[in-house]
Image (cartoon, rainbow, N blue to C red):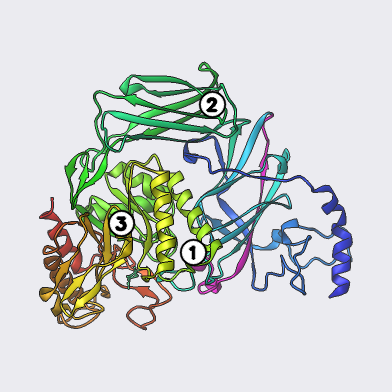
Amino acid sequence: MKETMRRLTSILVLLTAVMTVQAEDTPLIGNVLNRQTTSLNGDWRYLVDVQECGYYGYRREKLSYGFFRNAKPQQPEDLIEYDFDKAETMPIPSDWNTRDQRLFFYEGTVWFHRSFNYQPKAGHRTLLYFGAVNYEAIVFVNGQEAGRHVGGFTPFNYNVTNLLKAGENFVTVKVDNKRSRENVPTLIFDWWNYGGITRDVLLVDVPQTYIGNYSLQLDRRNPKQLNFSLQLSAKEANRQVTLSIPELKIRQMLTTDANGHVSTSLKVRKLQLWSPEVPKRYGVSLTLGPTDSDASDMVSDSIGFRTIETRGKQLLLNGQPIFLRGISIHEEKPNGGGRANGPEDAHTLLSWAKELGCNFVRLAHYPHNEYMVREAERMGLMVWSEIPVYWTIAWTDDDTFANASRQLNAMIRRDQNRCNVIIWSIANETPHGKERDTFLSRLSRQAHDTDSTRLVSMAMEVLAASNYHNKLQDNMNEYVDVISFNQYIGWYRDVKDAAKMTWEIPYDKPVIVSEFGGGAKYGLHGAKNQRWTEEFQENLYRENTAMLDKIDGLAGTTPWILKDFRSPRRLLTGVQDYYNRKGLFSDQGQKKKAFYVLKEWYEGKK
Ligand code: GCB
């Protein structure tokens, strides 16, 4: 072992000396899909590294000559115990669990590697952008660390300009999806821990100073006022930024302050608001001077405008009361398991929701890929977006809080111009307690401070006050704008109780039942009291929808769930087979009987 290490060290000493340039951490670029990009999606080489020997030595010391060096033998006697060029390939984006049978249950490290040709432009910068990597990613470019990211569902980017060279380059990513108590989510959660580079990988070409991110939204209370703000990538004063919305005849020139920031409010007279019926969006373009005809950076977007607010127990969209006819969705492919990604998957899943009569989707339990949100916006579906603060988190751990807070920030920053997002959710079914309250109230404040144009909620739990009386009591009630809770009468409790239930939600805020439902195996038929049959689920939906009608202030529901999804907690052979069967669609996309019950109920809510 020691002999091997000496040899490797001598081979790589030279490389180490040469590679000293550093990458920089860079705030998330906004609207990446409309920038100048080169896709690095496609076939990547991969190596499964159960003991992380590509990163740690035999005394668990961090190696300076790990797999990220992509070393090759220089002499015939050289010993190098990996070779990316001979490794198998996997299409990216994807999850390794459904791409390699050996990795179905695997949780650990996999290395991903690809080379690419690139010609950097003089005076430009290049960002390396990842839509998401589950869970921890350490990213290397040409053998040098560009950065590391924690959290499986949020985008991140690094300025890799100094790490790239003209011609052949390579990028290597160490991906680790081991669960841990301090992570967000934590050790246990009811969905598959799909590992891998699960969303797009892009090289983004930007000028030296570029439009970093921006927000253009209707004022929360005033439907005649647009609020705009923009941040440059550098703190440069006196740069000219032009905002144009041709259809509204808006063309506004602004000058950056010392922080490279501009903000303004604009009066608008006639505005067609976005709604599920008419999901109108306006073409918007942003240019960065010196002069408008000589723009150094330019971004176009398509932005809709709406207001969302509450009045007592009512939820108002564009000033009008609205009932949210929703459904919960996991980010899984429409046919079979595996992570969904891309516009087609999004379209199929959301079309099913439309067919059900929905105007709202709960994208559970983590921020979904950007295509989902954009496609929903285009199709007229409002969105609840959430972070995976799920069940029992390490409430007192500062790093855990920082992690949750970063995920919340990235979720908001990525989608802040998507008008269909109406609710940011900060948690799901968390246990009551002082430490939780501190953690969640900080997140709620952060969400409100970052974004005043949307509502904040979380999926709570109802505690039984007596056998047939449910009372919602949660200290977090004052921190949320909408009261949401999950309940499983008929599944984790006898369905016959549904008719007897009374509900007390003692808060003057709109109520969303963010989950209810039960499992059925598609094609299994029988009596309505026979668990796992479609008839059992159908009856459960009938009883539940009738019960929900009696909840005062009910402003919407997002039953659990659109489609059967993979879960390691669902082990019943022949029925579950590692699927949570609460879908209204089977894992193969077939409709179960309960689909029609909900569809009919939603018909009556229009
Ligand atoms: C819940 C959770 C959800 C589970 C569901 C179930 O309350 O929020 O993630 O999958 O129950 O099926 O038990």
Question: Marks 2 and 1, how far apart in space?
Answer: 37 Å
SS under mark 1:
loop
Local crowd size for mark 2, using a 10 Å CA cut-off: few (<14), some (14–19), many (≥20): some
Q: Which residue is mark 3?
A: 478
Compared with 432, 526 (above or below) is below
SS under mark 3:
helix
Residue type at mark 2?
A: Asp
Q: Which residue is mark 1?
A: 184
Compared with 253, 435 (above or below) is below
**Ligand 1 near label 2 (Cβ, under 8 Å)?**
no
Of circles 2 and 3, the one toward us is 3
Residue type at mark 1?
A: Val
Local crowd size for mark 1, using a 10 Å CA cut-off: few (<14), some (14–19), many (≥20): many
Compared with 587, 316 (above or below) is above
Of circles 1 and 3, the one toward us is 3
Q: Earlier in the sequence, mark 2 or mark 1?
A: 1
Residue 157 rendering spot, x and y as whole percentages? 58, 46
Question: Marks 1 and 3, how far apart in space?
Answer: 24 Å
> Residue 166 colored magenta?
no
Q: Which residues are magenta?
A: 96-122
SS under mark 2:
loop
Q: Which residue is mark 2?
A: 257
Tags 2 and 1 touching, CB below 8 Å: no
Question: Marks 2 and 3, how far apart in space?
Answer: 37 Å
Which quadrant contains ligand 1? bottom left
Quadrant where the image shows the N terminus: bottom right
Residue 196 rendering spot, x and y as whole percentages? 54, 61
- Note whether residue 367 is visible: no
**Ligand 1 near label 1 (Cβ, under 8 Å)?**
no
Q: Which mark is residue 265?
A: none
Residue 4 rendering spot, x and y as whole percentages? 85, 71
